[in-house]
Image (cartoon, rainbow, N blue to C red):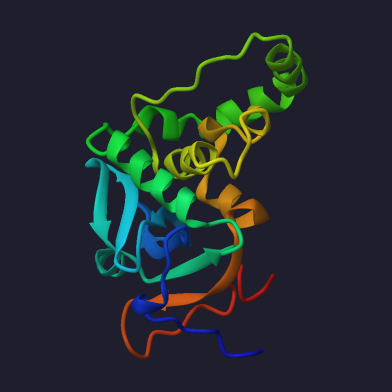
Amino acid sequence: MQSPTILALSDLFAGDVLLCYSGQMNEEHIEIRGYSHVAICLSSHRVLEADSGGVRVSMANNLLHSFDHIAVLRDDRLWDASRITSLENFAKDCVGKPFDMRGMRRVPERKEAHRDDVMREVEDYFAGMKKPRNMASFFCSQLIAESFIHVGIIDESAAVVLAPAITSPRTISEDRIYGQFIGYLVSHAGYKVPHEDRFRCP
């Protein structure tokens, strides 16, 4: 197996999507590993994210204090100057909005309902009956999906199918619209990315 590509924080660009991985213990003291958080770069050192404290702009290196490693997704063909400016404006509009804990917990249930109703929702959209999306509060992956809609990478019509309210970190990791994996940021020198990590075993 090839050694993973390790990036520096200075390698980051606006539009890069950061999938944050941790190995944690649950109440039964069983380790649970996985990508549980996602953010988007506004620059090489600033990121937009939504966590329990709400929507905020943070320093990219702060994520490495909370997570074991970060998988970086990028498609630099998508991020011209106008989209980067649009992303900054989206961040300004969203900072300070609360975290949507209830929405995050309902993602699995909403996915099931969406699977059953998506064709009707598409028909409703093209019939002019567009359903408003929640923009008053966000969970992390919903915020990233909405940012891609705001800057025009995901079209409003496609957003009916790629609904932010059912988007999870795993959804983002599997959908090439958010970029291709280019490498990892790691929390400390000598850290080993687990062999079973999804980007080491695509």
Q: Nearer the viewer, residue 131 or 112?
A: 131
Q: Nearer the viewer, residue 80 or 48?
A: 80
Q: Quadrant of residue 179?
A: bottom right
Q: Nearer the viewer, residue 191 or 94?
A: 94
Q: Is residue 175 visible?
A: no
Residue 142's spot in the image, x, y percent? 46, 38
Q: Residue at x 67, y 33 (%)?
A: 158
Q: Is residue 202 visible?
A: yes
Q: Residue at x 26, y 32 (%)?
A: 97
Is residue 181 placed above or below 130 in the rendered structure?
Answer: below
Q: Quadrant of residue 118?
A: top right
Q: Residue at x 43, y 23 (%)?
A: 134
Position of residue 106 in the picture relative to residue 44 (left or right): right
Q: Quadrant of residue 163?
A: top right
Is residue 72 placed above or below 161 in the rendered structure?
Answer: below
Total numbered labels: 0
Position of residue 91 in the picture relative to residue 117 (left or right): left
Position of residue 42 in the picture relative to residue 113 (left or right): left
Quarter of the image for the C terminus: give it.
bottom right
Q: Nearer the viewer, residue 180 or 1?
A: 180
Residue 186's spot in the image, x, y percent? 38, 78
Residue 34's spot in the image, x, y percent? 49, 60
Quarter of the image for the N terminus: give it.
bottom right
Is residue 3 placed above or below 33 in the rendered structure?
Answer: below
Q: Residue at x 44, y 61 (%)?
A: 18
Residue extending farthest to the front is 82
Residue 95's spot in the image, x, y percent? 26, 39
